[in-house]
Amino acid sequence: MVAPALDLPTRAVPAGRRRSGRHRRESAAGLLFVSPAILMLLLFMLVPILMAFWVSLTKWTGQGSPLKGKAFFRTAFYFPSVTSSVAISIVFLFMFTGGGAINAVLSVFGVRGPAWFSDADGVIHIVLSRLGVSAPGALVDHGLLGLSWWDWLSGPSVAMCAIIALVVWTTSGTFMLMFLAALQDIPVEVEEASLLDGVNRRQQLRYVILPMLRPTMFLVITLGLIGSWQVFDQIYIMSQGGPGKTTLSPAYVSYATGFQNQNFPAGAAMSFVLFAIIVLMTVGQRWLLRDRDASRERRASRRRGRA
């Protein structure tokens, strides 16, 4: 006996749903084809309209940039210069520990961070040792002032590199403000006249802007030199001259000699020697950054006066 065939009902897809699915596919294809034109319209029509609306709310004079983000960045760059050096030194000390943030970032790129404040080897020695380069015998057997040439070529220690990064970060904001004030003091007419004479931007920087920044450059270099010779508080807090006396500065050596070793005459003598070195280097910088054209004119005028 054969069982009768069962007529199972089939689910029919509504015509409206079929039309909506086809419509979505057609809409996506249409948007894909017109997307270049939409992007061009957004770039050359909508963005200028939004910028014009933003300018209408400001006091922009047509020179420079109308966005107000520059105030934030100026504050961010200058903020370390007015922050307590003790607080920043402690923060850097935690960042450069063995398990600190710096070594964690280096580990992301597959680099094993050094022991920043316990490794007395120089940066060049550390890099060469990791590359498998050993010390040449000629540099180890010969030297100067009790140190081999290999020791002289070791480079700064990683602890000194961390202190250098700290000092540069905390002082660059002040120098940035000096250069910013000097750049804003350059008359716009001078720059426009140089461009009308046919010079390009590189020539304008070399022959117009940099000569007018010479006094500011002399001031910044002089203050930077004096500050680098007088670094004390960062070394006192972070390393106290270690590891292996690789982070000593003249100011810290003078302090340690006078107050820690109770040798006050030697400490005072070191201070006066440091003062003399700073004066000589300042005079040398002034001679190197002098206006040679003005010097030649003065010498020529003296010759004419004698004649």
Image (cartoon, rainbow, N blue to C red):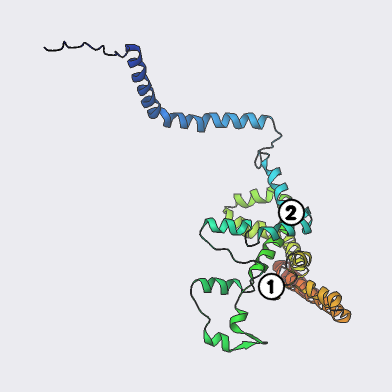
Residue at 59 percent across and 89 percent down: it is 142
Residue 242 location in percent, x, y?
71, 72
Q: Nearer the viewer, residue 6 or 79?
A: 6
Dividing the picture into quadrants, the one containing residue 47 is: top right
Residue 260 location in percent, x, y?
84, 75
Residue indicated by mark 1? 243
Q: Amino acid at mark 1?
A: Pro
Quarter the C terminus occupies = bottom right
- Other residues around mark 2 within 10 Å, as few (<14) / some (14–19) / many (≥20): some
Q: Nearer the viewer, residue 41 or 7?
A: 7
Q: Is residue 277 visible?
A: yes
Q: Farthest residue in the front direction?
A: 1
Quarter the N terminus occupies = top left
Residue 201 location in percent, x, y?
58, 53
Residue indicated by mark 2? 80
User: In the rendered image of this protein, does residue 82 appear above or below residue 126?
Assistant: above
Circles 2 and 1, Cβ within 8 Å, touching? The answer is no
Q: Amino acid at mark 2?
A: Pro
Q: Nearer the viewer, residue 40 or 72?
A: 72
**What kind of element bears circle 2?**
helix
Dividing the picture into quadrants, the one containing residue 100 is: bottom right
Image check: 121 left or right of 5? right
Residue at 79 percent across and 72 percent down: it is 252
Q: Is residue 275 visible?
A: no
**What kind of element bears circle 1?**
loop
How far is mark 2 from mark 1, CA to CA? 26 Å
Q: Earlier in the sequence, mark 2 or mark 1?
A: 2
Dividing the picture into quadrants, the one containing residue 27 is: top left
Which of the two discs, 2 and 1, sits closer to the camera? 1
Task: Check residue 12 in the rendering and tell me which mark sits there, or answer none.
Answer: none
- Other residues around mark 1 within 10 Å, as few (<14) / some (14–19) / many (≥20): some
